[in-house]
Amino acid sequence: MPKISQKERRLVTYVSIALAMAIIVSTLLMALVAGANFPIPWDTFMVVALMIGLFPPAAVNVIDSMWRASVDRNIPRFLREVAEADEAASP
């Protein structure tokens, strides 16, 4: 799992929210202009905007949590190997 920095997480969140807001605004504008001739229900676009706004930040958070859990799982092994290296190095 790759480490995801705080800056990258913020960037993903901001871009996702911006895209979701753009979809919501454009959907509302198209619904006002097209009126009853709107081919796809406007609530479908709202659900898509909600998914775009929530899924990428959540996925990045899950990936980062998996990385942190992996680091936590491997700390005892790392400390054991450091101790063994110290024992091997000392006469």
Image (cartoon, grey):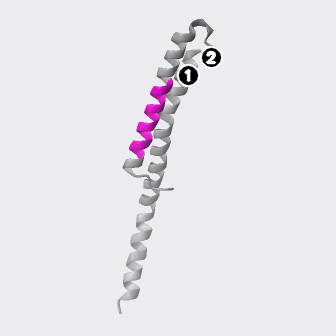
| Residue 83 vertical position relative to residue 19 in the rendered view, above or below | below
SS state under label 2: loop
The crowd level at tag 1 (other Cα within 10 Å; few <14, some 14-19, many 20+) is some
SS state under label 1: helix
Residue range corresponding to the magenta coloring: 9-23
Where does residue 86 sit, x and y in percent of width and height?
37, 82
Q: Is residue 11 on the magenta stretch?
A: yes
Q: Is residue 17 on the magenta stretch?
A: yes
Task: Report which quarter residue 73 is drawn in.
Answer: bottom left
Where does residue 85 sit, x and y in percent of width and height?
41, 81
| Residue 31 vertical position relative to residue 49 in the rendered view, above or below | above
In this view of the protein, which residue sits in the foreground, 79 or 51?
51
**What amino acid type should be assigned to the residue bearing mark 1?**
Phe
Residue that appears at 51% across and 25% down: 23
**What amino acid type should be assigned to the residue bearing mark 2?**
Ile
The residue indicated by pointer 2 is: 40
Residue lying at the far left of the rendered structure: 90
Residue that appears at 46% across and 39% down: 57
The answer to whether residue 65 is left or right of residue 36 is: left
| Residue 30 vertical position relative to residue 21 in the rendered view, above or below | above
Q: Earlier in the sequence, mark 2 or mark 1?
A: 2
Residue lying at the far bottom of the rendered structure: 91
Where does residue 41 sit, x and y in percent of width and height?
60, 15
Total numbered circles: 2
The residue indicated by pointer 1 is: 45
* Mark 2 and mark 1 residues within 8 Å of each other at the beta carbon: yes
